[in-house]
Image (cartoon, grey):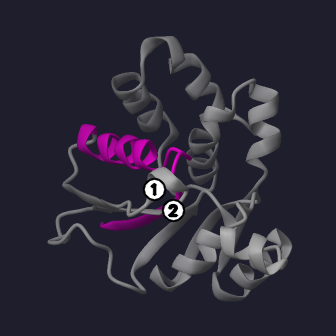
Amino acid sequence: MSKNIIICGVGGQGTVLAAKVLSQSAISNGEHVLSAETIGMAQRGGSVVSHVRIGDDAFSPLVPQGQADVLIAFEAAEAVRNIDYLKEGGTVIVNKKVVQPVTASLSGKAFEADEMISYLEKRAQKVVAVDTDQACQELGSSKVANMVLLGAASRAGLIDGEELKASIKQLVKPDFYELNVKAVDYV
């Protein structure tokens, strides 16, 4: 059974590492994986989108629009921007945090998380909104929001948590392994 996952956010949020952890989890499970990132101006806070396709029927690394089973959004506006990738009946895992773009600052019109999450709820069968700021504060590090979101996807039954933890051990420096596992298990 194939699975198409879109991970989106802005530069510096850990979307690329999250995609690598997901990909490694599937590879370790003997599954065929294709992935790609579009990072643009990510170093300047620009959009980052990672495509992860798992399964033997994936022949291209890019998820076609309307075919993603899961959209994991590290920022609410990026979830809205990428919602067209989600298939009917798909699930959105979204961070409640909004990173205000320069255009919002210049126009005086701030993006509101509640408005965006409400919009997502109209477009997706299931939306799981996660307060990563609170989670990171309780965990003691702002650098594990990516693993908190992967953990939320695991609890929603979309990905295997134990496989995630094994992949984290392979990809994250040993000094940060325990913290990242706590983030995956954060409830």
Quarter location, residue 97: bottom right
Q: Are marks 1 and 2 in contact (CB under 8 Å)?
A: yes
Which residue shows up at 51% across the image and 62% down it?
A: 46
The spot of residue 158 in percent (x, y) is: 52, 57
* Numbered range of the magenta stretch: 1-28
Which residue shows up at 34% across the image and 24% down it?
A: 170
Q: Which residue is mark 1?
A: 42
Using the image, determine if residue 71 lies above or below residue 177: below
Left or right of residue 44: residue 117: right
Left or right of residue 172: residue 36: left
Q: Amino acid at mark 2?
A: Gly
Q: Which residue is mark 2?
A: 46
Quarter location, residue 102: bottom right
Residue at the front extreme, as displayed: 106
Left or right of residue 151: residue 116: right
Using the image, determine if residue 116 lies above or below residue 122: above
Q: Compute the Cα span from label 1 to label 2.
A: 4 Å
- In magenta segment, residue 39: no
- Please tell me whether mark 1 sits on a helix, a strand or a loop: helix
- In magenta segment, residue 3: yes
Which residue shows up at 27% across the image and 72% down it?
A: 62
The spot of residue 13 in percent (x, y) is: 56, 47
Q: How many marks?
A: 2
Q: Amino acid at mark 1?
A: Ala
Q: Nearer the viewer, residue 116 or 3?
A: 116
The spot of residue 2 in percent (x, y) is: 30, 67
Quarter of the figure that contains the C terminus: top right
Residue at the top extreme, as displayed: 175
In the drawing, what numbered circle is on residue 2?
none
Which residue shows up at 57% across the image and 44% down it?
A: 146
